[in-house]
Image (cartoon, rainbow, N blue to C red):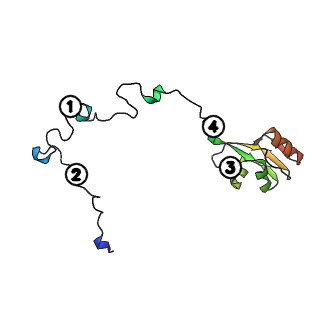
Amino acid sequence: MRLNTLQPGEGARTEPKRVGRGIGSGLGKTCGRGHKGSFARSGKGKIKAGFEGGQMPMQRRLPKIGFRSTTAKESVEVLLYALEGLEAGEITITSLKEAGLVPTNAKKVKVVKKGDVTKAFTLKGVSATAGAKAAIEAAGGSISE
């Protein structure tokens, strides 16, 4: 293959339709738009998604289901045994982000009791469940929210 022999694939480049250029072209008079109606007129050929010709559309006929929290993506849970890998001392949201335990967009972090902890931690700005609080305090740690 040489650079001077490169060309587009077969059928990749087609000639544009020349509409309104007489009966012999096959696209004269109505230019392939048919007779009357919204699609025959200029700027009127768009129908919004879900429009069913005036019938009550499907998205309005069906019942509304469920609830999607807007803050769910900002709050994260951290398992208790994951804190064991961190250095003992003060644990904040920024230190958890640096350690890669929570994503960077997290605004609320909660420690959930799963596993055990042996190091003494001080949680600052991080909430914890009742079981996690008891396990941290049993290991000699504390929680200040």
Q: Is residue 16 visible?
A: yes
Specify which label sits upstream in the sequence, 2 or 3: 2
State the separation of the CA atoms marked 4 and 2: 50 Å
Q: Please state which of the two labelled residues, at mark 4 or mark 2, is closer to the viewer.
A: 2
* Label 4, residues with CA under 10 Å away: few <14, some 14-19, many ≥20: few
Give the residue type that dot 4 points to. Answer: Thr
Give the residue type that dot 3 points to. Answer: Val
- Nearest the camera: 93 or 8? 8
Where's residue 127, x and y in %? 76, 40
The residue beneath circle 1 is 36
State the separation of the CA atoms marked 2 and 3: 53 Å
Specify which label sits upstream in the sequence, 1 or 2: 2
Q: In this view, does 30 lie to the left or right of 127?
A: left
State the separation of the CA atoms marked 3 and 4: 15 Å
The residue beneath circle 2 is 16
Q: In the image, what residue occupies the spot 46% across and 26% down?
A: 60
Specify which label sits upstream in the sequence, 1 or 4: 1
Q: In this view, does 35 lie to the left or right of 91?
A: left
The residue beneath circle 3 is 102
Where's residue 99, x and y in %? 71, 55
Q: Please state which of the two labelled residues, at mark 1 or mark 3, is closer to the viewer.
A: 1
- Nearest the camera: 5 or 124? 5
- Nearest the camera: 65 or 116? 65
Q: In this view, does 130 lie to the left or right of 41?
A: right
Specify which label sits upstream in the sequence, 1 or 3: 1
At mark 4, the secondary structure is: loop
Q: Can residue 86 be seen in this view?
A: no
Q: In this view, does 55 lie above or below 97?
A: above
